[in-house]
């Protein structure tokens, strides 16, 4: 089984329902701005272990159809999203018919001491937090302001229904315990996005 994603210009269609028609109409149109996207996509086949599954690419005009084995779809999705975040491209996911233009935040990200990233997207958080137990021996995730090791938010999976959520700002650490990894991902994205309204509604223990 395989899954398909389509990378296309963000303003090319009004809805996900128009993606396939747009791709078909693009056949034969020369690509102008796809070079960096194609290069980044091909890196998957040279940098990701073979067991994760090779991707196949089909460039049509300003679109790229990406086919990946089903078991590697979520990893490929994060790869593609990180590649196009902050650009003028959008991502269509044929599995659920979604069409998104991923937002990116410049953050230092540490996933269990095993994976490190310099950018962050909301989908990455929602993929990582519920899967921390399978992603790392010590299931933690840290999102840190670039160049400021004392300003960060982090979570540690303590049990299936228990996550420690902490953030440090202004010389103080704030801690709470939650049971919903999806909500934790929401809170961590709020923090990375500079929004504190939802975070302020939680009960925090403050310590030096």
Image (tube, rainbow, N blue to C red):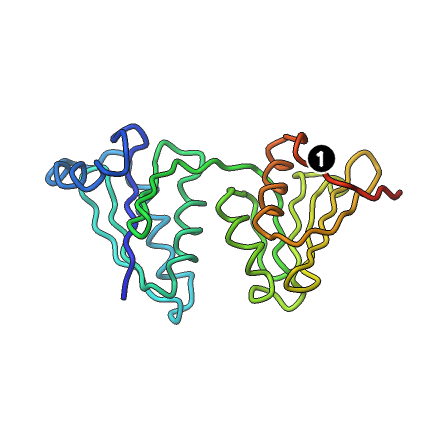
Q: Residue furthest left?
A: 28
Give the residue displayed 51% in from the left and 49% down from the top.
Answer: 124
Helix, strand or loop at disc 1? Answer: loop
Give the residue displayed 51% in from the left and 42% down from the top.
Answer: 121
Up the image or down, 124 lies above or below 114; here it is above
Number of numbered discs: 1
Rendering quarter of residue 53: bottom left
Dot 1, how many residues are within 10 Å of its Cα: few (below 14), some (14-19), or many (20+)? few
Query: Where residue 135 appears, x then y in whole percent?
Result: 56, 64
Up the image or down, 182 lies above or below 105; here it is below
Task: Locate the N terminus and report the quarter of the image it occupies.
Answer: bottom left
Give the residue displayed 12% in from the left and 40% down from the top.
Answer: 27
Q: Nearest the camera: 123 or 107?
A: 123
Would residue 115 appear left or right of 4 to someone viewing this image? right
Rendering quarter of residue 92: top left
Residue linked to disc 1? 201
Would residue 20 appear left or right of 200 to someone viewing this image? left
Give the residue displayed 27% in from the left and 56% down from the top.
Answer: 67
Query: Where residue 119 appears, x then y in whole percent?
Result: 54, 43
Would residue 37 appear left or right of 174 to someone viewing this image? left
Q: Residue furthest right?
A: 208
Q: Nearest the camera: 143 or 71?
A: 71
Would residue 98 appear left or right of 78 to someone viewing this image? left
Query: Where residue 193 appears, x then y in whole percent?
Result: 59, 33
Query: Where residue 3 appears, x then y in whole percent?
Result: 29, 58
Q: Nearest the camera: 189 or 81?
A: 189
Task: Locate the C terminus and report the quarter of the image it occupies.
Answer: top right
């Amino acid at each position: 089984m395989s899954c398909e994603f389509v990378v296309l210009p963000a303003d090319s269609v009004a809805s996900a329902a128009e993606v396939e028609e747009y791709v078909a109409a693009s056949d034969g149109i020369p690509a102008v701005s796809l070079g960096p996207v194609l290069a980044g996509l091909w890196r998957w086949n040279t940098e990701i272990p073979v067991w994760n599954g090779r991707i196949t690419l089909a460039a049509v005009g300003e679109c790229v159809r990406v086919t990946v084995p089903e078991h590697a779809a979520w990893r490929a999705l994060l790869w593609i999203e990180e590649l196009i975040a902050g650009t003028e491209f959008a991502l269509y996911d044929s599995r659920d018919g979604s069409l998104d233009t991923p937002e990116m935040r410049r953050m230092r990200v540490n996933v269990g001491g095993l994976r490190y990233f310099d950018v962050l997207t909301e989908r990455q958080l929602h993929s990582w937090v519920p899967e921390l137990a399978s992603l790392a021996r010590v299931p933690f995730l840290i999102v840190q302001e670039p160049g400021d090791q004392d300003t960060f938010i982090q979570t540690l999976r303590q049990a299936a229904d228990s996550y420690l959520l902490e953030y440090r700002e202004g010389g103080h650490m704030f801690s709470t315990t939650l049971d919903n990894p999806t909500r934790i991902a929401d809170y961590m994205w709020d923090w990375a996005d500079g929004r504190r309204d939802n975070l302020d509604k939680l009960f925090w223990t403050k310590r030096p």
